[in-house]
Amino acid sequence: MAPPAAASDDVPAPRVVLFDFDGVLLHGDAFYLFIRSRYARSWLRKLLVLPCLPWLLLQLPFSRRHAARTLVHAALFGTGEQRYQAQARAFATELVQHSRLFNRDALRQLRRHQQAGERVIVVTGCEQALVGGILEQLGLGDVELLASRLRATATGMRTGFHNIGANKLKALAGHGVRAWQVAYSDSLMDVPMLKPAAEPVLVNGTPKLCKKMDAALGRVVGRAEWR
């Protein structure tokens, strides 16, 4: 007679829940607000852009991303890594003081997932130091974070890994995450992240965007109206 099977001690892995940041937890784009503040506070940085204007005008009709990158590089010209980190943290503190910029319903939903014992990861195109500082100021410093990264050069901080679109899948794979159950986003750019989710959720989508997202995913996406 075979001995009785031992009871399994295996504990099921917690559900994985992904949140985009800009447009979901925050109304707007945090890094854009940071760069805009750099120009608003310095006439010198505005002057640095003047020689770039012909290039920007040529690039804008073809690639807004390249034009935006030029503006970022000018805004961070001469800024080393430690100085940038300090400035990003200071701006994060300043931003959180304006609580109306944050989506309270989304933050409550994130905390509900945490309280349920689920694994919450913020996966965002926002820059790592800035969004990390914001989450810390919001009392969410324990949330896992996958974000864009700048790189230090002799002329200042420049764009590095941009965590958008399919790059979010690379970041998740590099973090050891290959499956997730829920994903929240407000953008078609996140189709690669939403498609594998059992429960993809579009946040504050217009009827037109909802139709496009349904078509891109090949199914009806969940809707969340959060303020």
Image (spheres, rainbow, N blue to C red):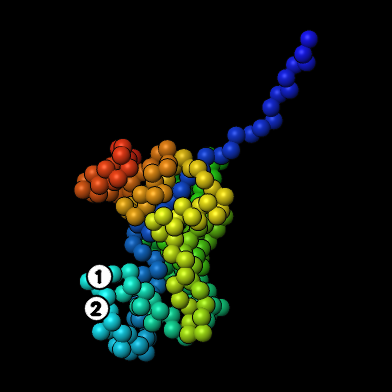
Front position in the image: 108 or 217: 217
Q: Position of residue 10 (x, y in %)?
A: 66, 32
Residue type indicated by callout 2:
Leu
Q: Which residue lies furthest to the top in this view?
A: 1
Q: Which element type, helix, strand or loop, lies under badge 1?
A: loop
Q: Position of residue 13 (x, y in %)?
A: 59, 38
Q: Can residue 132 be seen in this view?
A: yes
User: Gap in Å between the C-alphas at discs 2 and 1?
Assistant: 8 Å
Please name the residue that numbered disc 2 is placed on. 58
**Residue at 78 percent of width and 10 percent of height:** 1
Q: Position of residue 186 (x, y in %)?
A: 33, 52
Q: Is residue 223 above or below residue 95?
A: above
Q: Is residue 96 visible?
A: no
**Residue at 52 percent of width and 45 percent of height:** 178
Q: Which element type, helix, strand or loop, lies under badge 2?
A: helix
**Residue at 42 percent of width and 42 percent of height:** 196
**Residue at 49 percent of width and 55 percent of height:** 170
Please name the residue that numbered disc 1 is placed on. 62
Which disc, if any, is residue 120?
none
Q: In this view, does 17 lie above or below 139?
A: above
| Mark 1 neighbour class, 10 Å CA radius: few under 14, some 14 to 19, many 20 or more | few
Q: Position of residue 6 (x, y in %)?
A: 73, 22
Q: Is residue 224 above or below residue 20?
A: above
Q: In the visual, does 155 lie left or right of 209?
A: right
Front position in the image: 215 or 85: 215
Residue type indicated by callout 1:
Phe
Do the numbered discs 2 and 1 sit on residues whose CB atoms are within 8 Å? yes
